[in-house]
Amino acid sequence: MCGGRLRSSRALAVEAGRRLATAFAVVFVVVVAAGAPAQAQTPRPTPTPTPTPTPTPVPVPTTINSDLSAGAAVTNLGSNFLERLGDQATGGFGRASRSNPGGGGASEAMEAPSFRTWGEAYGVSSRTGAQGVFVGDRRQTWGGVAGLGARIAPGVNVGFSVDQSRTAIDVPLALQSATLDLTQFGFNASVDKGPWTWAVALVHGFGKVDSIRDTGSGTASAGYNAKIDGALTEVSYFWNMEQSRIVPKAALEYVHASTGSFQEIGGLDPVTASGATLERSRILLGAEIGHYWIVDQKVVDLSAYGKFVDNFEQNFNSVTISLGPQSISVQGIGESRYGADAGASASLSLSNTARLYLNYDGKFRAALQSHQGTMGVELKW
């Protein structure tokens, strides 16, 4: 009896231990299961992103297209003035007037007036094609000339003149424009020896360039100086055939132009540019033909000319464009080596001391065309 109770008590104790162990196991599993998601959901620190460096702006090669155009404009205006001075000295009509001051039919022994003065108004329209990083331009020039000349010895003549002009430069594909105000002083001299004439011409000029560039966030503007110096020597032969003439000519021309350095103001990313120098030497070979008529005691003269042009030497230094620490170099622009000039003139001599005239001068190059019209008046005494 006692042994049965003892076994029953042990069985109850074992059963209670098993239940207690099972309860502990269940609690442990629940705790572990509940703790695992909590641990998985613990946020991890987000890494700090590395900042992207801001790129340093670099100058664009087309930024100074208007400056390149202004340098070419100064050079060409200096050449135009030189060649007009040379034509005054060797032109067929002027040469005939010095030989026969009374006009057609008058005695060549008649004494020529010792002094003369002239005034001109002119306009030039030119277009330059694309060259390298230069996208091309259009230029319009308006100007006037006043001059005074004298015969200082038989067959020896000198002249002084002033040319004042304003050029509007448009570079539409680069969203740029500029104006060039140029003043030039000229001197020419000629010596007549039989049918031959030798002439020289000198030019010195200075001006101001004002440029504007559309940056997309306002306009950047700049102002800088320009200079031009040039010389020309020309020889011609006057071949007279009653009221007609043929005048072969040969000339050597040199020009040196420069534009100053500048710093743009305003707009987005204004740049700084160094000065530019342009040099050109060329030979001009051609001839003039002309004929005059006497109408109601007035002399009407018509003439035309053509010239072959060889730009045998052109030097254009590089322009340095700077924007902050970055800089690039851009080459200047020039003319093609070979080209042609052509023109015509109409003159009405009201007397042996007064004359009205109209001139056309055209220049034709591979990447350049220029057309100039001039009207003038000349008085002698």
Image (spheres, rainbow, N blue to C red):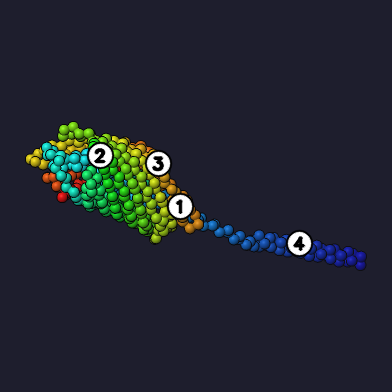
Q: Where is residue 50 in the image (x, y as percent from the top left)?
A: 58, 58
| CA–CA distance in space, label 3 to label 2 | 31 Å
* Quadrant assignment, res 6: bottom right
Which label lies toward us, 2 or 4? 2
Q: Where is residue 239 in the image (x, y as percent from the top left)?
A: 22, 34
| For residue 96, above or below residue 32 | above
Q: Which amino acid does label 2 sit on?
A: Lys
Structural crowding at the residue carrying mark 1, measured as other residues with C-alpha within 10 Å and reported as few (<14), some (14–19) or many (≥20): some
* Quadrant assignment, res 358: top left
Q: Mark 2 points at which residue?
A: 193
| CA–CA distance in space, label 2 to label 4 | 134 Å
Q: Which residue corresponds to the image point at 23% horizontal and 48% vertical from the top-left? A: 152
Q: Mark 4 points at which residue?
A: 25
| For residue 60, above or below residue 368 | below
Q: Which residue corresponds to the image point at 26% horizontal and 43% vertical from the top-left? A: 191
Kindly identify which numbered label has been placed on residue 320.
Answer: 1
Which label lies toward us, 1 or 2? 2
Which label lies toward us, 3 or 2? 2
Which label lies toward us, 1 or 4? 1
Structural crowding at the residue carrying mark 3, measured as other residues with C-alpha within 10 Å and reported as few (<14), some (14–19) or many (≥20): few
Which numbered disc flags the more N-terminal residue, 1 or 2? 2
Which numbered disc flags the more N-terminal residue, 2 or 4? 4
Q: Mark 3 points at which residue?
A: 313
Q: Which residue corresponds to the image point at 15% horizontal and 44% vertical from the top-left? A: 111
Q: Which residue lies furthest to the top in this view?
A: 241
| CA–CA distance in space, label 3 to label 1 | 23 Å
| CA–CA distance in space, label 1 to label 2 | 51 Å
Structural crowding at the residue carrying mark 4, measured as other residues with C-alpha within 10 Å and reported as few (<14), some (14–19) or many (≥20): few
Helix, strand or loop under label 1: strand
Helix, strand or loop under label 2: strand
